[in-house]
Image (cartoon, rainbow, N blue to C red):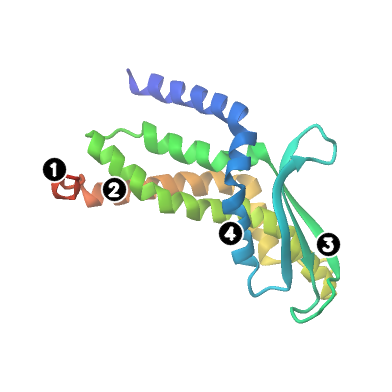
Amino acid sequence: MRPEFRWAFAAVVALGVGVTCAEPYARLAVPYYRGIVRLIATGHPWEVLSVEVGPGKSNLRIELQVRAYVRRLREDLRPSAKVIGRVQVGEVIETPIVFWTLLLVWPARSIRQRLTRLLVGVPIFFGLEAMTTATQLILPMAQASAILAGDNDAVTGWDLWSRFLEAGGQFVLICGGAMMAVSIAQRMGPVSADCLPRPA
């Protein structure tokens, strides 16, 4: 298949998978998002109550939602605010669709090189998920903390990062991560036969 046709076919397939699998993927990934959001919240006056997939405000769209308490100070017994972070499931699936499509379609000299690339891609992918979807979920907590501190018009680092992602930075970040996986796998070379299991 000619390269341009292969990329066009991959784009159509990726779009179809994104449309049909966005909600199932978001539900499947909830435990990861719950863990990473709680990890990011560590050290902040934030208490993550739940991370789940549910209907949005209009009930016409499905969202990945985080509910959390925000305190003025970490040692406060009572929370000062309750916030809900929302990311549409269509945005949630953007990172895996773009990242894994690039890794799978990018030309490889052998099956072993492609497998090496996929293995290298796993930790990079999880890092990208933390830097994109998870940080978008955290944003309302940071905004609530700024308001509680008296800075109603404050632009936090979380706000700047969120604006960067929404302005196309997420796509650039994902593509950069995929290219990093390709480069690292190429430097590693093919998987050595010594690393493969031998028959008994």
Q: Amino acid at mark 4?
A: Ile
Q: Amino acid at mark 1?
A: Ala
Q: Which residue is mark 2?
A: 185
Q: Going by the image, does 71 lie left or right of 41?
A: right
- Labelled pair 3, 2 in contact (Cβ < 8 Å): no
Residue that extends furthest to the bottom in the rendered view of this protein: 75
Name the mark nearer the viewer: 2 or 1.
Answer: 1
Q: Which residue is mark 1?
A: 200
Q: Label 1 neighbourhood size at 10 Å, few (<14), some (14-19), many (20+)?
A: few
Rendered location of residue 125, percent (x, y):
46, 49
Q: Is residue 150 above or below residue 24?
A: below
Q: Label 3 neighbourhood size at 10 Å, few (<14), some (14-19), many (20+)?
A: some
Q: Earlier in the sequence, mark 4 or mark 1?
A: 4
Q: Earlier in the sequence, mark 1 or mark 3?
A: 3
Q: Label 2 neighbourhood size at 10 Å, few (<14), some (14-19), many (20+)?
A: many
Q: Which residue is mark 3?
A: 82
Q: Secondary structure at mark 1?
A: loop
* Real-space CA distance between mark 2 and mark 1, rounded to the nearest whole angstrom: 29 Å
* Real-space CA distance between mark 4 and mark 3, rounded to the nearest whole angstrom: 19 Å
Q: Secondary structure at mark 3?
A: strand
Number of numbered tags placed on the structure image? 4
